[in-house]
Every structure is written in structure tokens, then in C-alpha cells.
Amino acid sequence: MKLFYTVLVALLSIVLSACNSTPREPISARDGTPYISQQSAMQRSARISDVKYDLAFSLTGENRFSATTIVNFNLSDTSKALTLDLNQANISHFSINGKKVYPNYNGSYITLNPGLLSTGNNTVEVQFSREHSTNGEGLHRFVDPVDGKVYLYSHFEPAAAQQMFAVFDQPDLKANFTLSVTAPKAWTVISAMRESSITELGDTRQWQFPQSPKLSPYNFSMHAGPYHQWTDNSGPYPLRLFARQSVAEQVTPNDWFTYTQQGLEFFDGYFGIPYPFKKYDQVLVPDFLYGAMENAAAITFSESRFLFNSEMTAAQKQRLASVIMHEMAHQWFGNLVTMKWWNGLWLNESFASFMGTLATAEATEFSHAWRTFYANNKQSAYHLDSQASTHPIEVPVASSQNAFDNIDAITYSKGASALNQLNHLLGEKAFQKGVQDYLLQYSYQNAQLNDFIKSLGNAANKNLTTWSQQWLYEAGVNSIKADFSCENGRITQFNLTQSAPSSALSTLREQRVQIGLFTQGRSRLHHNISMPVTYKGATTTVTRLIGLHCPDLVYPNYQDWGFVKVNLDPVSFKTAKQNLRLVKDPLLRSMLWQSLWDSVEDGKLSLNDYIGAVLVNLPGETDQTIVGQVLKSLSKTRVYLDKMDPSNQRFAKQAIRAIEQMSLRKVMIKSDSRDFQRRWFENYVSFARSKDALNHIDALLSDKASIKGLVLDQDLRWLMIAHLNRYDHPTAMYWLRKERDVDNSDAGQKSALAAEVSRPDALKKRQWLTRIQQQTNLPFSKQRSIIENLYPSEQKALSAVTTEQRLATLAKLDSEKGPVFMRSYAKYLIPTNCSYANESALQNLQRNSQLSDGTDRALKEAIGQEQKCLLIKSKMSH
């Protein structure tokens, strides 16, 4: 019936078009999907201007919602048809300029008959109903399993506004939005503007919102439900915070409001433009696809990342502050001034990452934020930029379907590092002035990369053409190394040598760094001097260092100004390996730890030697950021150890046991420091393999054992129960059933699902895999829990059972499931087992399959991971 209706509508529309005898140009090609190519989008925006949306929604909490969209716009010509995006809706009324017609609708967009359009002002009205989404896009519906209450929130980036209303869904068609919502009486409705009126209508209320400033469709939002609300009117802008009622006790509003007020004050000053919207709302939402989203004045945050069952640790608070700052920076850079097309998304995210870290370091108690950025974000960027799948920061984006293909650590963290490097190269004041000029000139408009670079170059009086080409259009990370010689205890020659990763990625970049020189003392490494140097090309001679004391360690990117991998010279490498505990500067210590780990992944240091260095040096580490950094490397180490050949399995078992015991000792010792103790306990659980350790976890759960100072909150209990299930401990299923009955929350259900699918049961795993590969009514957030936990690294043999199935079905899934599903599936379920046979199978698949860009990149990364694992395995000493 639906197909018949669609065909009938199309035929009637053709008849109507034929009645108009004026010859017209061919319709711009679109492929019938919800996505639009850059070419089609540019053609559309060239014809349209002054767009206004009048949106009305009727929300009941049921599976469907009904709505009316009235679009007003100016059209420059009627020479050809125009498309209006609307995804999978049942249209009940459609009119163009007051004339009711049958919509020419294919389920993805409506083709507007040019014979019914006018040059100048036009009005299109669409009345429709649609199912709510359950995959985190469009207007997402969530039913709280604790109390049955329904919550809605919208998410539109990159082009999912069309899942909620009829729209020209592209970033350069900014528009004014007016909103009216009828919703159940107990609900609150949140949008870009504060409501102007709320009218009682029996069991419902009607919310009216005034017209918004000009926004790109993906920046607009609407959230509704019986949200719990906190307010803070102590600053210049009214603040509100929302969360589901059943999780309200897990929210610490004072932290949220403190960091938000600090950020608004900082950005008002830095940008020189007051916060551009009238209020600042933040909403914690379930099933969210990402960490947060910068909707104008109504920012959404993922519950899974920012809700905890006990007091936040310092690291968790820092992460909250950092993400608040990141999304806040977008309110100016992204919402006030918006990219013209999705190739500019990198700049949007890079700038917010740079500014978010800067604001966290300068406006909050987390003055060490740049150290955290180095240890976490930057290392992810170095890792990706060193792989065959790397890509330039600035890349073409063919269609809205490809908008997120390149959204990764290169986009966020390499881009942020490049901007930080440019900040040092131009000088902080010139960089800030360039940013201010850019925001002022393009307020409430769209802009492109060249506009931003031109503003910075003009402010610093520097031509940035070469810089842009080297940093933004060329992929790969360079390496630098100090090359020096000494006589009679003095430096006689000093060069910085720069190398490119390969002949295919041969660019040698210009950047400004600090060179740090150190000599070894009895109880510490003494810092002799830091010298700023701008280097370029293969070799840069640093004559100013000649004649200084011969150092025991040279670090050529001291204080981390540059985005560059450091290869320590032989003298410095030996000093670093033997004297980590003598390095008092925490950032330098962090960088030396990273140099050791990089040497493992580059095949220059055996995994055996690295683990030995960890066991000797890490127990005495007092800096939380560094402890977290090294424990993260140990997590990767565990994955490598799990994939070793039989000849290395004895060492792997001994190493895991040693780390397990070291972690437990630290848990016992750190009873006076909750944050340290918790971090070490989580590591203890992840390395618990021995019968004694697994029994100890069981005893802790049953209160037959305890650890001084350690409180087992709900998050830790699920961590422990999941681990017991991974290793099929005799009590594992008992604890899983018991905890599932106790904790019926959304987080609890996902934790129980993760524990269940991780169990070492080959038949059940195949059933789970088949379920997510086929059509299922399971919400995507739960599918994601299955995907991420189905094959833990130690279950190498169980993973092998379905390896052929996963390889054989990858291309089919890629064509059917869409980018949201495949981003998770490809990351976790492309098989890797550290074997030459699997590497060959992946390469064969990559050569012979037509995959989307995003899945193809994930496959290349899996191949790179196999190659790295094989290299590390080959360097292992038996």
C-alpha cells in the first residue's frame, strides 16, 4: 500500500509539472537517499536565501509524533525544481504558496514543483507524522526502565534535522526558527530560546518559543520530557541543568554550574564578543552517540560519560570541565560563525578542542590540562597519523553521508595541536586578535577555512599559505631528533634533524619548539636550559647551544609546543630508561614515559623491557595524570600479551600476574587517596587472571573480604561482575542475575548485557553476532554494548570461530546498516588476532571489497594494528 501511494504521488506530481509549459533546466541530480552531495547543496544554497522555519510539534510520549513545518524562503529563480529534506514521514497535508498539492516525495526529500514556486518569497507547509528514532539521531525517544517515564531529545549533526522536520538540511542555509510544542503537562520543553509562554490545555501544555537568531539546522534543537531541573542565576547569563528524574541524585549541579560560569567569563574575555545567546542550558541524555553536542544554548551531554554512582574523582571532574569548555567554545566558533560545508567540520572541532583545553587550564583548578591533553588526546592523534589510514586535516567531503568519515583524533587532536603550534608561531596576542576579527566579521554567517587563516595572517602580518599547505593538506606526523657532539664536557655541534614518515608522506614542516637540556645529578635530573627554536627542512643548526655543558638528556620538544614525534638520541634514551624517577618536571616525565612506549610500538624496545621499566618505576609515581597514562599503555600491553604465540605465553602469564600483584599492592597502600586507589583498583580488576585474584573479587562482592578505604559503588560492582563473567568464574552468573535484579537502571541493563555477551561461550557469541547483523528492534545503544564486549582480547580462539563470518559479511553490512552502526561495528568486530594469515585476509578484503570510506579506513587501521602487533611479537625476548 505504501509503495502504491508513493507511485501515485509521483505520477500526479509529474502530471502537475507537465501542465506548466515553460521549458526548464534539468533537475539537479540527487540519488533518492537522505544524503546530499556538496555540488547539489551548493546549487541549492545559491538559489535560496532568508530562510525561516515555523515549527509545531505534538508530543504524546508514544512511538510517533506529529508536526507541522512551515518554511518561508526567498528563491532567486524558478528554472528548475528544488528539494526539501524530510526523512521517512507520513505526509498528511502539503501546500506550496497556499496551493494544496500531492507531494512528490520519495521518503528522503520532497521535490518542489518549480511551476508552483515564485521568484522571491515562497511558503511551503508540510503536515506529517513520524516514528521517533532509537539510534541517537533525529528526535530520539527513551523510556526509563526504572519509572517508565518518556524522554525525548534531538540530535541533528551532521544532517539528521530532516528526521524531525522538513528542512534544507545543510550548514550554509542558516535560518531563523520559531517553535511551538504541545506536550504532556508534566513535561519541560527545552530549545535554543527560552520559552515566551506556556499555556495550560487540559492534560497538556503548549510551549511557545520566540524566533531564534540565524542558525544552521544542525545547531538547532528541541528536548522534551519530565526532566529534573536545576538553575543558577548568579552570573550574567541564566543557567539551567536538566537530567532524568531517576538519575538526578547522581548529578552534582554545583560542579556543572561552577565550570560553566568560569568558562563563560573566560570566553567573553578571550573572544571579545559577549556570549551570543540569551541563556545557557545543559541536558544530560541517555543513549547518546557521542560525548556531547553543541546545540545552540541547549547543549546535550552523554549520561554514560558524566553520570557516576559515587563522588567524582579529580580526573572525572577535569573531563567534565574540559567537555563543558569544548562545547561552550562552539557557541562562538561553530554556532555564531558556522562552516559553509562539512569539510570545515575539522576546524570546528579542532578549534573547540584547542580552546576547551586552554580555558580548562586558565579558568579552572585544572591548570595541568595541557599535560592531560598530551597524555591522552595527542597520543591518539600521533597513533592515527602514523598509520596507513592517515589523512590530511582538511579533506574534501563529497556528500553529507561522508561528513563523519574523517572525524577522529586527527580531526580533533592533531587539528588542535596544529592550532596550538600556530599560537606559538604567531604569538598569543596576534592569534587571539585574529580569532576576534574572524568572529566579528562573520557573526551569524557561514565562513570557510581561508577566511579564518586570512584573519590570523592579517593579525600577525604573516603569510600563512605555506603553513596551511604543510599542516592542513598534507598527512603524516614528522619526527625530530637531537644530533649533537661534545668535547671536554661542552657542546661543539648541535642540529635538529627532521624526518618524514615515508616517501609518500615526505613533507617536512616548519614549527616552533623548545629544546630542553638536562644533566644527571645524584637525586634529580637538572634542567640546564630551554631554548625556543623555529626549525624547518631536514636539518636546522642551533648555534646558540654550542659551548654549553654537554647534556645527559636532550628533549627537543620541551613543554610540548610542537606536534612531532620525538626520537631520543642514544644518550638521552639511556638516561630516560634508567632515571625516570629522577625527573621532577611532570610533563617531561610524561613525555619520557611516552618515548619508551613509542619505542615498543616502533619495534625499538622489547615489550619485556618496557614491562620491566613499568614494574620498577610506576609504583613510585605520584602524579595522577602520569599514572593514568602508563596504566593506559598497560591496557594496550595486555592486549598484545593476550595475542602472543605459545612460545611467549609463559612470559605473558608471568607479566600479567606481576602487574596484577603490583596493582593490588598499590590499592592496599593508597587507602588515604580515593582517586589513586580507585584508579589502581580498576587496573587490578582488568589484570585479574589468577585463581586467587578472581576469588578475591568474588569475596569483595560478597563482603567476605574488604580493602581499607575502598567503597564498592554500583559502577565498580558491575566492573567486577563483568570481569568474573569474562573468565567464567563459578559465581559469575549468580552475581550477574543478582545485580541485574538490584540495578534495573538503563546503565545497569547495559552493564548486564556487556557482562553476558563477554562470557566465553562460542554458541552464544555466534547468536549475539547474528542478532546484531540482522534487523533487530534492540535500541542501538544496546547493540553497541554487544559490539564492544563480544570478543575481549583474551578470547582469541572464540573470536576465530566467527572470523570468516565477520569478514564475509562486512561489505553487505556496510551497504545496509549505515554509518552510525558501522562506526562501532568496524572498530570492534573487524577481526584482529596478531597473525600473518589474518593480516593477509584483511588486506585481501580491502583490495577486493567496495566499502564506504569510513569502513575502509577502519579496515586499514585493523591491518595496521595487525602489523604493529606482529612487529612487537617479533621483538619479544623468549
Image (cartoon, rainbow, N blue to C red):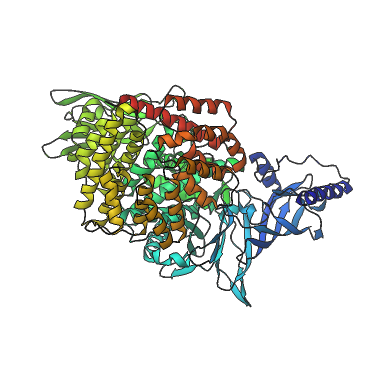
**Nearest the camera: 401 or 437?**
401
**Nearest the camera: 711 or 582?**
711
Query: Residue 263 location, x and y as percent?
Result: 40, 58
Give the residue displayed 32% in from the left and 39% down from the top: 633
Name of the residue lying farthest toward the front: 730
Query: Residue 416 location, x and y as percent?
Result: 42, 43
Q: Quadrant of residue 378?
A: top left
Q: Can the viewer see residue 585 in this picture?
A: no
- Location of the C terminus by quadrant is top left
Compared with 281, 400 (above or below) is above
Answer left or right for 663 relative to 286.
Answer: left
Name of the residue lying farthest toward the left: 522
Answer left or right for 185 relative to 628.
Answer: right
**Nearest the camera: 271 or 18?**
18
Q: Can the viewer see residue 294 in this picture?
A: yes
Q: Quadrant of residue 154?
A: bottom right
Compared with 445, 596 (above or below) is above
Query: Residue 737 location, x and y as percent?
Result: 42, 57
Query: Residue 44 location, x and y as percent?
Result: 69, 45
Answer left or right for 127 relative to 412.
Answer: right
All told, the count of numbered labels is 0
